[in-house]
Image (cartoon, helix red, strand yellow):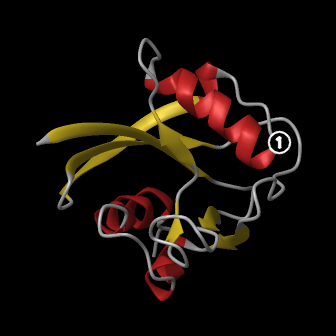
Amino acid sequence: MKLLLVAACALIDADARVLIAKRPAGKELAGLWEFPGGKVDPGERPEQTLIRELKEELGIDVKEACLAPLTFASHAYPQFQLLMPLWVCRRWEGTARALEGQELAWVRPNRLRDYPMPPADEPLIPHLIELIATPG
């Protein structure tokens, strides 16, 4: 089975919300919400992928030093095995805009389950809830 490496990023704003994007019609898994990112190209490091994808998809500039690895997901789809490391980013330049026809939403981590996601994204949610949990 082919291994597909996809880098994903949880952008976290000053209000402790996470940015998710809805896959547009016509794309595989259309209508599901996901963390921004994309396939790692041959010869590319995952951090480079995120910097490139966040610029292309959202129009924001991210420095590699602002990307912090958090966790990863592994999921077997029928045609491939997906390996998806998740980074957290709290600092970037510019305002996130939907540049590829996707819908965007800033969501509190404990509300992420209200948005249908691909099976590979769902296991990442508890890590974000724990990361952003406020002391009680």
Residue located farthest toward the left when viewing the structure as drawn: 1
Please state the horizontal and vertical placement of residue 131, each as a whole percent of the image: 43, 56
Please state the horizontal and vertical placement of residue 112, each as a whole percent of the image: 49, 77
- Other-residue count near label 1 (Cα within 10 Å), few / some / many at <14 / 14–19 / ≥20: some
Please state the horizontal and vertical placement of residue 110, each as a whole percent of the image: 48, 78
Which one is in front, 54 or 1?
1
Residue 4: image quadrant is top left
Residue 119: image quadrant is bottom left
Kind of residue sitting beneath label 1: Gly
User: Is 133 situated above or below 80?
Assistant: below
Residue located farthest toward the front when viewing the structure as drawn: 26
Is 24 on the left or on the right of 82, as rendered? right
Residue located farthest toward the top when viewing the structure as drawn: 43
Q: Which quadrant of the figure contains the N terminus?
A: top left
Query: Disc 1 on helix, strand or loop?
Result: loop
* Residue 91 visible in the shown view: no
For the image, the number of numbered tags is 1
Q: Which quadrant of the figure contains the C terminus?
A: bottom left
Residue at position x 75%, y 55% in the image: 100
Residue at position x 74%, y 39% in the image: 56
Residue at position x 50%, y 75% in the image: 32
Please state the horizontal and vertical placement of residue 129, each as a whole percent of the image: 42, 67
What residue is shown with label 1?
59
